[in-house]
Structure formats: C-alpha cells, structure tokens
Amino acid sequence: MRTLKLRLSYDGTNYVGWQRQTNGLSVQELVESAFVPLMSRAVERPVASRVRGGRAIEGRGPTVAGAGRTDAGVHALGQVASVTLDLDLVPSAIQRALNVRLPDDIRVVGVVDARPGFHARHHALGKTYRYRLVTTGVLSPFDRWYAWHAPDARDLEAMRAAAGRLVGTHDFASFQAAGSAVRATVRTLHRLDFAADAGGIVIEIDGNGFLRHMVRAIVGTLADVGSGLRPPESIDAVLAARDRAAAGPTAPAAGLTLVSVRYAAVC
C-alpha cells in the first residue's frame, strides 16, 4: 500500500462541492471513480452510480480525502487530496490516467508519493482563499460563474481598515454558517489583502483554518463596510457577539476559489 498526495484544480460550477453528497455530483466522487480502472484490486466501499455527460460512473473506488470541502459552486486552483491504495504505477502515469477519466472541468495537476499516514485535511497547516467581487454596472458573461456581481461603489480603504481588525487569532463564531455543529470556533487569520482588479476587487485570505462559509461571510461583511452600511470599527462588536446575525450576508459561492493548502515540508 502507498499514500499519494494529489493537487487538483476544478471549476466548481457543476458540482455540489468537493465532498460526496446524496443530492448531487461531487468532485470527490468523480476522482474516486477515476481510480477504479487503475487499481490492482478493489478496496473501500462502493461509489454510488451516477450519470454525467451520458456516461455511467460506478465501481469500487478508494476514499480520496480532500484538504477542504469547498461548497457547491466554489472553485479550486490548488485543492490537495490524499489517498492510500495498492497501485503499481509511477506518479506521472497516475496523473495522466486520472485526467483521461475525469471531465474537463476537473484536472489533477500534480501527483507525488507522500509519507505513510499523510492525510490532506488532518495535516494541513493553513489555506489561502481568493474572492473576486465585480463592481461594474454590467457583468461580463465570462465572469458570471467566477465573481460576485455587486455593482456599487466600494470604499476600499474602509474595507482594509475593517479587515485589519480580523487579522490575528479570534473567535469567528459570528462568521460561521448558521446551524453548524462545530464548537471550536477560534481561528487565526495570517493575512487579509485587497487588490483593485479591472472592474472590481480581489480579496485574498490566508489562515490556519476556516469554518463553514467563513470566508464568504467575511467578504459579505467587508462589502457592507465598503458600501457604508457599517463602519470599520463595527467588526469588533461582530466578533464579540458570536452570533451569525451580527455579521453581514454570505457572499455568493461563485466568487470564491481555494488557491492553495500549506503543509510541513515533510508531507
């Protein structure tokens, strides 16, 4: 048996997210299914049968664990996944074979052998996300799945001031999806940067971990600040409230991309 570390890029528009679910097709499910013809012996539990592009997908595949679940409609440039299985092929051959079997909106961009026991989620030290907000009056049709169209003037300096209050170690319960079962809500944001983009704003957030919808709730709250709906210093009260209702709206999934996942060098 060997453990592989995969790096993947995908357009999340057509999927219910990374994680396997019963209400639609996931990236995880397709990656697991792509391993089936490569394996020297079947392991793990069956992958549910689906149909995509007129082709049935079924078989027994290994469990592929992702570093982050990425919700429906969220994209990835550098998702990381791990899988342990019995497979006698060099990493480059595995990469080619998986890509032949995956749809065009999911690509395996790297495969390496990892140390035994490596787990993409459990051993992650941090992640970087990027969010794109378009403020022009008309949204390009080529951006419709990759940005939040919010055609209002934004005070970028006010947004930066508010963001500065979020950097560091805080209880981010106010920025967690309502109804979440996660109890430990303290996280550390290492960086929260802004850049003016052609027709919009790009926000990049780096942290040691993220609660469900945390990045999108932060973006929605900062957008409120940029629109003058709340002052930058209100962030302190939002954090202290530990109540989702205290923060701004959850920004749409389409604007969010998982850029990269950080690990110790030994992984």
Image (cartoon, helix red, strand yellow):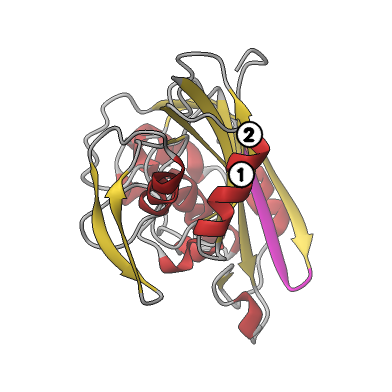
**Residue at point 41%, 41% (across, down):** 238
Percent coordinates x, y for residue 69 in the rendering: 40, 43
Percent coordinates x, y for residue 106 in the rendering: 54, 58
Percent coordinates x, y for residue 182 in the rendering: 27, 31
Indicate the quadrant where residue 174 lies: top left
Which residue is nearer to you in this view: 89 or 201?
89
- Specify the segment rendered in magenta: 198-205
Which residue is nearer to you in this view: 224 or 16?
16
Residue corresponding to mark 1: 95
Magenta span dominant secondary structure: strand
The mark found on residue 91 in the picture is 2
Percent coordinates x, y for residue 83 in the rendering: 44, 31
The amino acid type found where label 2 is placed reads Pro
Residue 192 in view of the camera: yes
Say left or right for 160 vs 79: right
Secondary structure beneath dot 1 equals helix
**Residue at point 28%, 64% (across, down):** 50
**Residue at point 35%, 33% (across, down):** 41
The amino acid type found where label 1 is placed reads Gln
The mark found on residue 155 in the picture is none
